[in-house]
Amino acid sequence: MTAASSVELRATTRLETVRSDLLDVYAAVRAPLLHLPNYAVTAFGERLDRHGSEPGFTAVLAYADGEPVGYAYCNTVERGDRYWQRTSPEPSDTYTARPAAALKEIGIRTAWRGTGTGTARRVHDALLATRDEPYVTLMVNPAAGDGKVHALYETWGYEDIGRSRPSAASPVLTVMARATEG
């Protein structure tokens, strides 16, 4: 389970081919939060279906022994997109002048975290390798993992550029961005 070579990465632009696997991994990753309306599997499924129909949808899933152990997916966002409209303060033209990739979700099963395989980073980097946009952005709950998730993204080159509350059920999230290469 800990050998990086035992993890197979698969990329797709077709949600229907991986939807079930995404839901399964999401439920395992977010298990402690599933009682909260924004984190419920049904709420995630609705967001996933919306994101899967938006421009530039791409997902990368990690499999070990044929079982899904992690995923990341993104879309393309352009100036004027509701993603940017909800970000405060208004992001600079650096990020909005051209389309950007918006990393909507990343999740790795607990057994695959901190194992030395770098599964999360491998999934993240494989996803970015599919992108043409100059920048990638994501939103993170600053309280996730007692701040460790935010700190991890900083080590991956992301910088804070604002805040957003995507829905009434969502906590206030930190909006981060970085160049897609790097």
Image (cartoon, rainbow, N blue to C red):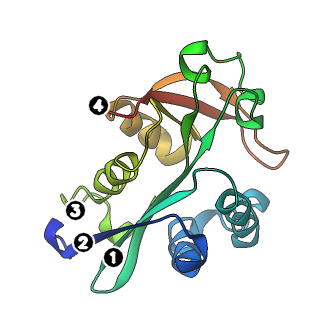
Amino acid under label 2? Val
Q: Which residue sits at x=49%, y=28%?
A: 177
Amino acid under label 3? Thr
Q: Which badge, 3 or 4, is on the more N-terminal residue?
A: 3
CA separation in Å, label 2 and label 4: 23 Å
Relative to residue 83, is residue 75 drawn left or right? Answer: left
CA separation in Å, label 3 and label 2: 12 Å
Q: Are marks 3 and 4 in contact (CB under 8 Å)?
A: no
Q: Secondary structure at mark 1?
A: strand
Give residue 63's mark.
Answer: 1
Image position of 123 with respect to 144: above or below: below
CA separation in Å, label 1 and label 2: 6 Å
Q: Quadrant of the N terminus?
A: bottom left
Q: Which of the 4 image quarters holds residue 20?
A: bottom right
Alpha-carbon neighbours of circle 4 within 10 Å: few (<14), some, or many (≥20)?
few
Q: Are marks 2 and 4 in contact (CB under 8 Å)?
A: no
**Which circle, 2 or 4, is nearer the viewer?**
4
Q: Are marks 1 and 2 in contact (CB under 8 Å)?
A: yes
Q: Which residue sits at x=71%, y=66%?
A: 49
